[in-house]
Amino acid sequence: MGERTLSTSARNAVHNFTHYAAMVDAGAEVIITRRGRASLKLVRAEPVLTTKNRAALVQRALSIRSAKPFKGKFARSEAYDE
């Protein structure tokens, strides 16, 4: 199923939650309205980092940090791209 957006009322979403959850799981976005105005958007959740993925990310960060030792004073403004 391709990327698509559906719209429904809050009442209908509550009564047919399983249906809309399946649609979101398949890739659709569901806009829930209250009194005719968009109130919520149901989208598929991002994957949570597993212990294995987190460990690999920490190792990568540590390798970058150890590869480029910092010398001198550090100003907070230097930490951000403008």
Image (cartoon, helix red, strand yellow):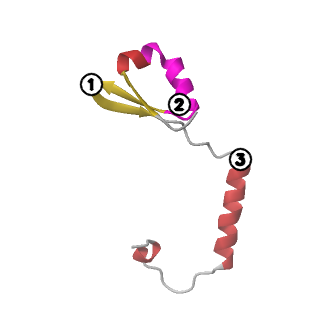
What amino acid does circle 2 point to? Val
State which tag comes first along the sequence, 1 or 3. Answer: 1
Indicate whether 62 appears above or below 19: below
Residue annotated with mark 2? 24
Q: From the viewer's perspective, is 8 left or right of 18? A: left
Residue 24: where, in percent of width, then height? 53, 30
Q: Furthest-bottom residue in view?
A: 72
Please say if the residues under marks 3 and 2 sit with CB atoms less than 8 Å apart.
no
Q: From the viewer's perspective, is 61 left or right of 29? A: right
Indicate whether 52 appears above or below 74: above
Q: Residue at x 52, y 19 (%)?
A: 19
Residue 82: where, in percent of width, then height? 39, 73
- Specify the label residue 51 is tagged with: 3
- Judge by depth and name the residue closer to the eye, 15 or 51: 15
- Judge by depth and name the residue closer to the eye, 71 or 4: 4
Q: Is residue 73 magenta?
A: no
Q: Secondary structure at mark 1?
A: loop
Q: Main secondary structure of the magenta part?
A: helix
- Specify the label residue 55 is tagged with: none
Residue annotated with mark 1? 36
Indicate whether 28 appears above or below 13: below
Q: From the viewer's perspective, is 15 left or right of 47? A: left
Residue 47: where, in percent of width, then height? 61, 42
Q: Furthest-right residue in view?
A: 52
State which tag comes first along the sequence, 3 or 2. Answer: 2
Q: What are the residue bounds of the magenta stretch?
A: 14-28
Q: CA distance from mark 1 to mark 3?
A: 43 Å
Q: Quadrant of residue 64?
A: bottom right
State which tag comes first along the sequence, 2 or 1. Answer: 2
